[in-house]
């Protein structure tokens, strides 16, 4: 899946993938996401989930929720940095 945020001159693009039951013995899924800003990777993560997903859809929903939280945080950091650069 792809999450797209477009600013005036730049873009924050996020990609995610979730694997349902990548560890079937423990019932855990694996998730990964990557954020790119101006063609530079600024955040990435690949982990085994703590929560046990009941289906592949459930696994995707959990991943999307965490990715959206990361996207909001990154947008705020980018805006803060832009304001700081404009003032200096």
Image (cartoon, helix red, strand yellow):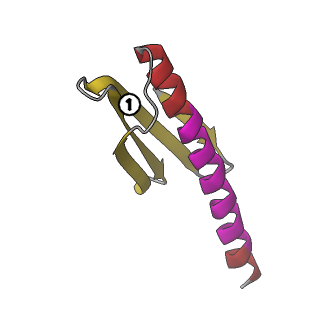
Q: Residue furthest front?
A: 26
Q: Is residue 58 above or below residue 13?
A: above
Split into 4 quadrants, where in the image is the C terminus?
bottom right
Q: Is residue 9 visible?
A: no
Span colored in magenta: 65-83
- In reply to whether residue 80 is colored magenta, the answer given is yes
Q: Residue at x 43, y 39 (%)?
A: 50
Q: Is residue 61 visible?
A: yes
Q: State the residue in front, 57 or 28.
A: 28
Q: Residue at x 35, y 44 (%)?
A: 47
* Residue 46 position by quadrant: top left
Q: Is 43 on the left or on the right of 9, as rendered?
A: left
Q: Is 63 on the left or on the right of 25, as rendered?
A: right
Q: State the residue in front, 49 or 12.
A: 49
Say which residue label 1 marks. Answer: 17
Magenta span dominant secondary structure: helix
Split into 4 quadrants, where in the image is the N terminus?
top left
Q: Position of residue 76 (x, y in %)?
A: 69, 58
Q: Is residue 20 above or below residue 32?
A: above
Crowding around mark 1 (Cα neighbors within 10 Å: few <14, some 14 to 19, many 20+) is some
Q: Is residue 75 above or below residue 25?
A: below
Q: Secondary structure at mark 1?
A: strand
Q: Residue at x 23, y 26 (%)?
A: 25
């Amino acid at each position: 899946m792809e999450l797209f945020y477009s600013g005036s001159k730049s873009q924050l693009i996020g990609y995610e993938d979730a694997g349902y039951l990548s560890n079937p013995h423990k019932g855990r899924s694996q998730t990964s996401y990557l954020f790119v800003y101006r063609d530079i990777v600024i955040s990435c993560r690949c982990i085994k989930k703590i929560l046990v997903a009941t289906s592949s859809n459930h696994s995707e929903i959990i991943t999307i929720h965490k990715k959206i939280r990361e996207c909001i945080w990154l947008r705020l950091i980018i805006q803060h940095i832009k304001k700081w650069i404009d003032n200096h």
